[in-house]
């Protein structure tokens, strides 16, 4: 059985791959429309799902037309229900594995042939690695690690390869990834007297392979769904070290990047129960009249002091550099200029080392009209004195306005070429192409969706962007039109995009303080949205994480080698 949801590997900060033991999670199938009438009322009734499934078997024995289903189809419906009501990754995995067996996904994985990737290229690279291992040819293994590794070898990162089964992809691809990781381990362990040489080669291999980043979008209170995404990746040992957040996403990534691995499990749970009264103090709600009055007198509906108070309580006066030194995670927070001509900024330990994180989060969450624009605060690393980041009166607003997902800057600064995005912006999600559905031939009864709706929505968005550009050029509210065009015209999806389930009944409440009940539901939604993506994430990140682990291991050996000791 493939192990996808095992305990975390504590060997390195930010996750690793040893805890996977060849496990690979896969993409989620949304509830089959033809059986929605069966599953929807059933799932509302079930309160202890796994204890109650036996009582529901008879109810699942009949199709929507009233005819009794075959034993094979009854078993499939039962596993679909298990999948839908799973409360842990292990439960979800067990149901997904059974469905892959029932629906033929395992047979598809065992057949190497496919026109969705270059079978011969992947097989040839695998055979060469296996030959080098069998012959103990360390020179050839070092050469291949240094020159031949790529994330998308022969198109094996093709999204379509994850639409034929619920867990994993072609066995050949997974065997290649496992063999590469074993080869890296052998080269690292066999460095011997040439530790420095192997260290330099591994650094170059990592640089050539590229790095991954997790990007958390804005979305008001809906941004709390990111907590579940982070928890699922952390538990699986697949949390990238480079993490970026804008607006509400900056709150989650700031908490994540200021806590160590040992602290995170408790923090992620307690975060849902802590004080998050960022809009209004608990017990002191403003009336509609009070909010309108504040808007016309202060330019914002809510007092930004509430937001800064909560952030200071969560983060203290820790700076970006201090957070990096403490956790080795690279925190990035996007902020936009309140003016028209200042460029948006990506704040991290390189570009803004002494900026206090709470002030960056407050600025990134300052949605125009909701919170007043904020200034960034810095702390002197020697004296601890605080002050403004810039001498002028520059103020900053919501990072999502200009740069919700700062992919270009992350690529420039940190060599990131693979982006995992958690997207919850309510004005964005309807326009995103949902890649999760299995291909129709992979599941009996599944029909192609109507993509014309998605196409028409994108055409409407393109027309709106054009009209806003024309209005800005004609001088009609140029600043507002430019900011609005920036919001609608950005790229909002990544190489892997996780979209937690949301109800549009929640949208009117995205600017209200989250309740503990909402936070717990958001945590669950984020986790459930991530479980089907773990297979693809693992296959895309496994080699990168193993290279990163090798570099850190070799660095420690080089630092404490006799030659280095003599120099100290």
Image: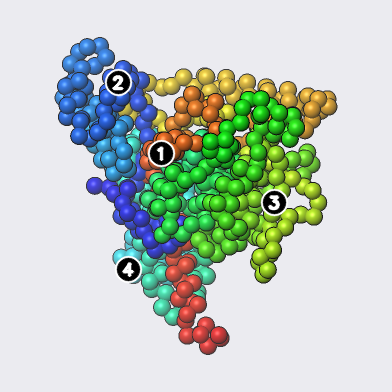
On the image, the x and y values in percent for residue 323 come to: 56, 60
Q: Is residue 288 placed above or below 192 in the rendered structure?
A: above
Q: CA distance from mark 1 to mark 3?
A: 32 Å
Which is more N-terminal, label 1 or label 4?
A: 4
Residue tagged 1: 520
Residue tagged 3: 376
Residue tagged 2: 41
Which is more N-terminal, label 3 or label 2?
A: 2
Residue toward you, 307 or 427: 307
Q: Is residue 509 visible?
A: yes
Q: Is residue 119 placed above or below 478 in the rendered structure?
A: below
Q: Is residue 556 left or right of residue 531?
A: right
Please identify, in this view, whether the residue under mark 2 or under mark 3 is nearer the observer: 3
Which is more N-terminal, label 1 or label 2?
A: 2
Q: Secondary structure at mark 3?
A: loop
> Looking at the image, which residue sits at the far bottom?
566
Rendered residue at 42%/48% (across/down): 270
Q: How is the image coloured?
A: rainbow
Q: CA distance from mark 4 to mark 1?
A: 53 Å
Residue toward you, 347 or 152: 347
Rendered residue at 31%/17% (across/down): 37
User: Which numbered circle lies on residue 135?
Assistant: 4
Residue toward you, 429 or 112: 429
């Amino acid at each position: 059985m493939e192990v996808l949801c095992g305990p975390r590997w504590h060997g390195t900060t930010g996750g690793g791959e040893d805890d996977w033991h060849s496990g690979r999670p896969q993409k989620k199938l949304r509830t089959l429309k033809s059986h929605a009438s069966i599953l929807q009322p059933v799932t509302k009734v079930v309160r202890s799902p796994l204890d109650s499934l036996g009582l529901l078997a008879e109810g699942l024995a009949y199709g929507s037309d009233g005819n009794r289903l075959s034993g094979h189809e009854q078993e499939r419906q039962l596993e679909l229900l298990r999948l839908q009501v799973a409360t842990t990754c292990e439960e979800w995995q067990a149901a997904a594995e059974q469905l892959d067996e029932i629906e033929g996904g395992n047979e598809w994985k065992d057949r190497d042939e496919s026109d969705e990737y270059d079978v011969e290229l992947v097989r040839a690279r695998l055979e060469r690695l296996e030959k080098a291992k069998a012959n103990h040819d360390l020179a050839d293994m070092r050469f291949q690690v240094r020159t031949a590794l790529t994330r998308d070898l022969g198109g094996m990162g093709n999204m379509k390869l994850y639409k034929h089964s619920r867990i994993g992809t072609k066995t050949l691809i997974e065997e290649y990834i496992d063999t590469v990781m074993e080869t890296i381990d052998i080269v690292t362990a066999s460095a011997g007297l040439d530790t420095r040489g192997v260290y330099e080669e591994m650094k170059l291999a990592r640089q050539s392979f590229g790095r991954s980043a997790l990007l958390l979008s804005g979305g008001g209170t809906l941004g709390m769904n990111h907590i579940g995404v982070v928890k699922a990746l952390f538990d699986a040992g697949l949390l990238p070290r480079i993490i970026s957040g804008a607006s509400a996403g900056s709150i989650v990534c700031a908490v994540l990047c200021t806590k160590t691995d040992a602290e995170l499990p408790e923090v992620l749970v307690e975060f849902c129960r802590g004080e998050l009264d960022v809009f209004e103090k608990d017990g002191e709600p403003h009336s509609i009249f009070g909010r309108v009055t504040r808007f016309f007198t202060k330019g914002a509906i809510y007092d930004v002091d509430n937001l800064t108070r909560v952030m200071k309580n969560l983060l203290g006066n820790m700076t970006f550099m201090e957070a990096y030194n403490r956790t080795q995670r690279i925190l990035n927070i996007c902020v936009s200029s309140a003016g028209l001509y200042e460029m948006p900024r990506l704040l991290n330990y390189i570009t803004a080392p002494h900026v206090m994180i709470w002030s960056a989060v407050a600025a990134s969450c300052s949605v125009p009209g909701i919170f007043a624009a904020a200034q960034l605060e810095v702390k002197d690393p020697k004296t601890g004195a605080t002050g403004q980041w810039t001498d002028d009166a520059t103020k900053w607003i919501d990072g999502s306005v200009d740069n919700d997902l700062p992919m270009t800057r992350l690529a420039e600064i940190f060599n990131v070429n693979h982006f995992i995005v958690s997207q919850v912006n309510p004005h964005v999600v309807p326009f995103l192409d949902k890649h999760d559905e299995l291909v129709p031939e992979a599941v009996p009864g599944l029909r192609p969706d109507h993509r014309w709706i998605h196409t028409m929505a994108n055409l409407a968005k393109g027309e709106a962007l054009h009209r806003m550009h024309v209005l800005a050029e004609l001088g009609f509210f140029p600043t507002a039109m430019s900011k609005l065009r920036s919001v609608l015209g950005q790229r909002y999806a990544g190489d892997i995009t996780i979209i937690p389930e949301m109800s549009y009944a929640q949208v009117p409440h995205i600017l209200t303080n989250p309740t503990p009940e909402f936070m717990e539901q958001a945590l669950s939604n984020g986790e459930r949205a991530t479980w089907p993506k773990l297979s693809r994430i693992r296959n895309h990140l496994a080699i990168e994480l193993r290279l990163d682990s090798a570099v850190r291991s070799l660095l420690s050996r080089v630092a404490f080698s006799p030659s280095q000791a003599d120099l100290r």
